[in-house]
Image (tube, grey):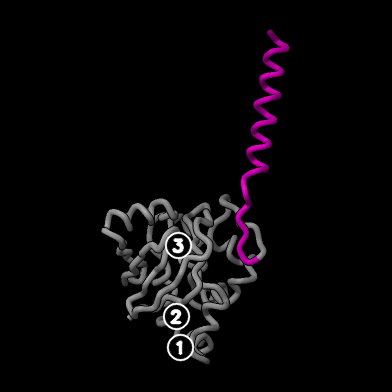
Amino acid sequence: MHTKNLVGLAVALALSVTTLTSMAQVTVGGAPMYASKDIIDNVVNSKDHTTLVAAVKAAGLVDTLKGAGPFTVFAPTNTAFSALPAGTVDTLLKPENKPQLTKVLTYHVVPGKLDAAALMKQIDAGGGKAMLKTAAGGTLTATASGKTVNVTDESGGISKVTIADVNQSNGVIHVVDKVLLPK
């Protein structure tokens, strides 16, 4: 009986290790993202989000996004920021524009954790769209096109979720290809 228990334990352990190693590690911007780390501790390692990190620091939102949350963050890439009109990012990063920068950044944050499944469920329940209230007080509209989620801002700009479900200890990040702009 003792041998059977050891064999059973060895098989269970082998299956557990196989399951853990076969689970795909999500990477963003070439960096692994760990569900055990908070939003800031993960995103600072993404080479695709250096502009977002600089903006979060300039707006003084680091401590907020390291907080308990949970938060759903639609995280624009460097390419998304570079698609803004020339000089926009530099202007927003100036200390005198901190309130405007804060509004733009918190417009990308929805209180609560909405992974892709929860987002799709809300879209289905809303007859094809989900209205998401942002931390900035504005609204984002999420729609689905097949398995792709699109997020429309109040200005009519449409951003596509390119990497969904980057789980964090205090929420979830969905990488988007455009900067979302409030009215």
For residue 14, side relative to residue 115 (left or right)? right
Closer to us: 43 or 14: 14
Q: Residue furthest bottom?
A: 86
The quadrant in which the N terminus is found is top right
Taking 70 as reference, is 10 above or below it?
above
The quadrant in which the C terminus is found is bottom left
Secondary element at image label 1: helix
Closer to us: 28 or 143: 143
Mark nearer the viewer, 1 or 3: 3
Task: State the mark number for residue 101.
Answer: 2
For residue 71, side relative to residue 3 (left or right)? left
Tell me the residue that label 1 is attached to.
96
Secondary element at image label 2: helix
Could you tell me which residue is drawn at 44 percent across and 58 percent down? 147
Amino acid carrying label 2: it is Leu
Q: Which residues are magenta?
A: 1-29
Could you tell me which residue is drawn at 42 percent across and 60 percent down? 146
Amino acid carrying label 1: it is Glu
Do callouts 1 and 3 mark residues in contact (Cβ within 8 Å)?
Answer: no
Q: Earlier in the sequence, mark 2 or mark 3?
A: 2
Secondary element at image label 3: strand
Could you tell me which residue is drawn at 46 percent across and 69 percent down? 160
Closer to us: 126 or 44: 126
Measure how far apart labels 1 and 3 are at the Cα level. Answer: 37 Å
Could you tell me which residue is drawn at 60 percent across and 53 percent down? 34
Taking 86 as reference, is 23 above or below it?
above
Tell me the residue that label 3 is attached to.
148
Residue 115 sits in quarter: bottom left
Q: Earlier in the sequence, mark 1 or mark 3?
A: 1
Q: Position of residue 32 (x, y in %)?
A: 65, 57
